[in-house]
Image (cartoon, rainbow, N blue to C red):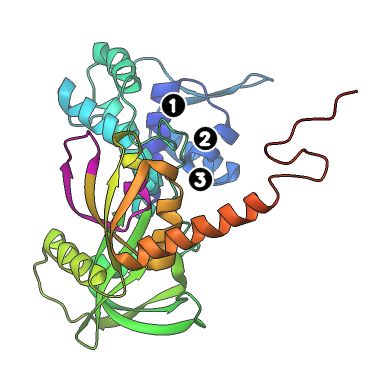
Amino acid sequence: MRADRLVSLVLLLRQRGRMTADELAGELEVSARTVLRDIESLSTAGVPVYADRGRHGGFSLLPGFRTELTGLNHDEALALLTAGSGRGEKVFGLGTALASAMRKVVDALPEGHRTSLDDAARRFLVEPDTDLLSRRLVTEDVASGVMGVVRHAVLTGHKLRFQYTAPDKAPRWHAVDPIGLVTVRGRTYLLATKSGEDRTYRLSRMVTAEELPELAERPAQVDLDRIWAERSAQFLSKNHIPVLVRVEPTRREELLNTARAVRAEEPEEDGWVRLDVTFEDLRHAVWAIWQLDTAAEVLAPESLRAALRDRAATLNARYESCARSPAEPSRGSTPDSH
């Protein structure tokens, strides 16, 4: 870890020029005192780091100093920089490692390509926080320390024990054999087996976790795409309500963002889109369809149509009863003339 930090420190000074101890500490996620010790170690090892005193001082490398790293061509570097510019810093708790890797990528470029690559990468934006309708991407928070423990157990193949809070239930301890991690729309899931049975856990619901010394019982090879597809299908088949709905094209994405899954989709002659989607339960379906106002029509099931009809009738009766205040004339009458 310290060797990686020393390389990152050198790369930061190469790419940004003069930096203060506090600025370096913020980038490397260590204390300023640790930075000073690292700089002293680099100087002892022959790396030409020197200090500028004064109010605008800091640390710099002698001009022309260059580390020896494997080079990349333009498109390879651009691909990595673009991938790292999105939400990768939040995936699997690898933000620090990603930042370090990006610094190495930039440093590996030929001198004349760095400026052009930096400008090119800034012209690509991957998964911003909001879409065109200002809807924020919801990213779930994982308890401090949980992600690192879970990730390490997955990679080393050890059993995992954690305290888990399911909706409307008290926290419980689980001991599982971890298989892999999957991140979908800002949520991270652990795929595992428990006593030989398939299990899927959301990391944001883990209170604490610990890696056990015993080796996990799991196959040597894994196909996460296949496993995720199978578990998704199994999950959707239990306690979920399928809905057949027509929706205006302009509101299609809004509907898809609230649905749990899309089973089928086809255009209709009038320009609307027919969707076969799945919601968590009837209450969820009523809430999601109601948001679309008159831009959606439920075709099935009848229970959902009835629930929407009852809600509309209730609201209609409520607002109809207060449509005429005592100060207003009744329908069909004219104000008194004076």
Q: Which amino acid does the dot numbered 1 rest on?
A: Leu
Q: Residue furthest left?
A: 221
Q: Residue furthest top?
A: 112
Residue 231: percent from left, percent from top: 20, 69
Residue on which disc 1 sits: 13
Residue at point 15%, 67% (across, down): 230
Is the C-beta separation of discs 2 and 3 under 8 Å?
no
Label 2 or label 3, whichever comes before in sequence order: 2
Residue on which disc 2 sits: 24
Is the C-beta separation of discs 2 and 1 under 8 Å?
yes
Residue 127: percent from left, percent from top: 35, 36
Residue at point 44%, 71% (across, down): 206
Label 2 or label 1, whichever comes before in sequence order: 1
Q: Which residues are magenta?
A: 255-273
Closer to the camera in the image, 225 or 88: 225
Q: Residues within 10 Å of mark 3 (few under 14, many from 20)?
A: few
Closer to the camera in the image, 319 or 218: 319
Label 1 or label 3, whichever comes before in sequence order: 1
